[in-house]
Image: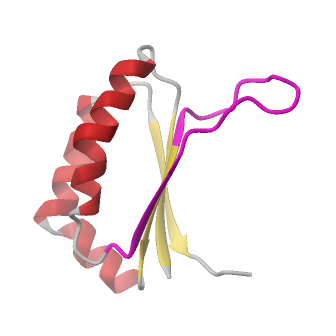
């Protein structure tokens, strides 16, 4: 498998961020050709009550690097990347690479 992990910083307006993410961005991501699975997590405070470093973590899994490149390079992938400017003003870190189950 090959994955794209998106780590979204805490937005100023969490409700507006979540609404856009759920209603616009996630549906765009699910349309990317080759996506085998999309996982979304909204971290909660840790046992000590500390705020987690990220507001939302999304993981898109592809069968391999070629499927990732084709999907993200196509119009659906480009639309999802372009949409980041519409809601992720607090910043997002994108990580890509092979993944393995252990």
Badge count: 0
Corner quadrant of residue 55? top right
Identify the residue at horizontal 33%, vertical 20% (top origin): 16
Report the colour scheme: secondary structure
Q: Residue furthest top?
A: 12
As for residue 25 lying within the magenta part, the answer is: no
Identify the residue at horizontal 22%, vertical 53% (top origin): 28
Give the magenta part as a residue range: 35-56
As for residue 46 lying within the magenta part, the answer is: yes
Q: Residue furthest left?
A: 75
Place of residue 77 in the rendered image (x, y in percent of width and height, measured from the top left): 22, 61
Q: Give the camera-side residue of 20 and 77.
A: 20
Q: Give the camera-side residue of 22 and 79.
A: 22
Q: Quadrant of the C terminus?
A: bottom right
Q: Give the camera-side residue of 90 and 57.
A: 57
Corner quadrant of residue 35? bottom left
Identify the residue at horizontal 41%, vertical 15% (top origin): 13
Left or right of 83, for residue 42: right
Place of residue 92 in the rendered image (x, y in percent of width and height, measured from the top left): 45, 39
Q: Give the camera-side residue of 40 and 12.
A: 40
Left or right of 65, for residue 72: left
Place of residue 44 in the rendered image (x, y in percent of width and height, measured from the top left): 67, 33
**Secondary structure of the magenta portion, mostly?**
loop
Identify the residue at horizontal 50%, vertical 82% (top origin): 1
Left or right of 53, for residue 7: left
Place of residue 101 in the rendered image (x, y in percent of width and height, measured from the top left): 67, 81
């Amino acid at each position: 498998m090959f994955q794209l992990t998106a780590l979204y910083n805490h937005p100023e307006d969490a409700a507006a961020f979540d609404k856009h993410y759920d209603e616009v961005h996630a549906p765009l991501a699910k349309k990317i050709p080759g996506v085998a699975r999309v996982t979304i997590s909204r971290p909660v405070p840790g046992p000590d009550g500390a705020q987690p470093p990220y507001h939302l973590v999304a993981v898109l899994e592809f069968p391999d690097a070629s499927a990732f490149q084709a999907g993200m390079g196509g119009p659906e992938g480009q639309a999802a990347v372009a949409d980041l400017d519409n809601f992720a003003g607090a910043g997002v870190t994108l990580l890509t690479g092979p993944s393995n189950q252990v």
